[in-house]
Amino acid sequence: MNPRSVATSIFFASLLAVSSFAATPPLLKVSKAPPITPSNPIWMASQLPLSRWGYIEEEFFIEGSANIYKALTAPAEVTGTVPYKTRILVRRPADAKRYSGNIILEPIHPGRSTPALATTFRWIYGNGDVWVGVEPPGNISFLQQFNPTRYASLTPVANLTVHDSLAQVSALLQSPSSPLAGLQVRDVFMQGISATCGVVSQFINMLHRETTLANGKPIVSGYMPGECSVALEDINVPVIRINTQQDFNAKARKLDSDDPKGRYRLYELTGSAHFSTNNPLFGVPVPVLRAMGINGTTGDTITCKEFLAPTYGMLNDFPVWVFFGGALKNLQEWVQKGKAPPRAQPFMTDANGALVLDEFGNAKGGLRSPMVDSPTAAWHARGTDCNLWGYKVSFTAEVLKKLYPNREAYVRQVKQQTDQLVRSGWITESEGKYLITAAEKSSTPEPDNPFLTPMQPFHPYETQ
């Protein structure tokens, strides 16, 4: 081999070592999974009646090759490439005429759930978006344990992350080979919460700039990683991060920006805990997990020390979803209409970076809501033995009656604050109605009775 050939080979080898794809991800081979029947069920089928929104659920198998990375940081360094076969889970409008043109792409959580969908499903289903969940190859063994026949052809690869699959699926759905026949995709948005917030954040830093569509456009039009504090680099599409009070990290903050080279918003939700009370409704049902011998991963049993004397607290059921749905709507409008979303004040902190609390024990600053500006409880983002769920302590009757002479006064105050949130674009009208209805149904100015209020995180929010 002549010196020029050797130099050329070394150049392309070094290029492969620091980049996942040269530009456009290779298209996947895709096939429709077998029909979904009671005798041939799918893993993690929707626990909500999708027909209520006019939606259907489908499953496809995808196969291709993906890179193994030395570290999930930029620049991406590839140590090997392996073949894989996994699945994507699709929830879409049954009537193609209802389709919005948006794809909401989400990596399925390694804990066998879709926590981001748990916070945005009302906007997604109501808006006519298509939701697509990508199964990490490391999860496949659970699928095969659940239904060995259906998932026999899939390949569990424990050390293969889902990052390349996300890029490949995004390219597939925006190509003529898309399994979503007849649906013209306008934009793909990627969301993730908790562990999958980390995945989305890593994708932003490692792969967004390295991967494009065949026409040179961004592989993803906008991102919404929530409930993690991975530092984010500036990219050429908008990013909105929502963090709960439990996920607060002053050192990892990034300033809001409208610069086209790094459009960004950070929303810090005052009073909120890491887990949403909707989470168990967007994973594998507890009886199924129990039958498979899987315990302690779904939050079906919560034992906070603060539930007992002398605190008599209750589960922190702060409705984080009312803000996530509005944020996803704002992200889409930022991309498609050029409408910049509102800015929120950050949490107030002291010289040591610790949160500053008000007279009720709630954090000052952050994205405000009736839950903390018309408070009926002190919201704690962390609890003893329930770190991710948190707890709340209801105000006494004496305190409540000083704040609100009667229920009408309380509801009126909540309604005024909620209407302002809707007008300012923080939440959707649907979520605003929820907050007002919740206030009307509350016991205020009488305190909640912790012995009568469920402490388990199963709130049938979809029925309200």
Image (tube, helix red, strand yellow):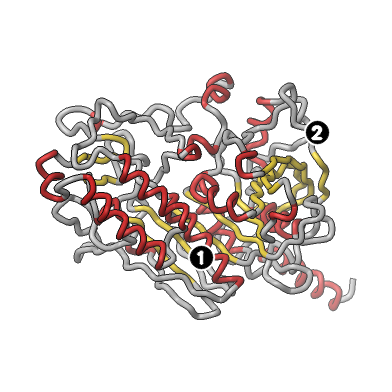
Q: Position of residue 343 (x, y in %)?
A: 39, 70
Query: Between 282 and 146, which is closer to the camera in this rendering?
Result: 282
Mark 2 to mark 1: distance in Å?
37 Å
Query: Between 237 and 211, which is closer to the camera in this rendering?
Result: 237
Q: Earlier in the sequence, mark 2 or mark 1?
A: 2
Residue 388 in view (yes/no): yes
Residue of label 2? 34
Q: Secondary structure at mark 2?
A: loop
Estimate how packed mark 2 is, as few (under 14), some (14 to 19) or many (20 or more) residues with alpha carbons within 10 Å: some
Query: Between 104 and 16, which is closer to the camera in this rendering?
Result: 104
The kind of residue on which mark 2 rests is Pro
Q: Position of residue 22 (x, y in %)?
A: 75, 68
The kind of residue on which mark 1 rests is Asn
- Which residue is found at the position 46% from the left and 61% from the top? 241
Q: Position of residue 224 (x, y in %)?
A: 52, 59
Q: Is residue 29 above or below residue 239?
A: above
Residue 78 in view (yes/no): no
* 57 on left or right of 191: right
- Which quadrant holds residue 351? bottom left
Residue of label 1? 330
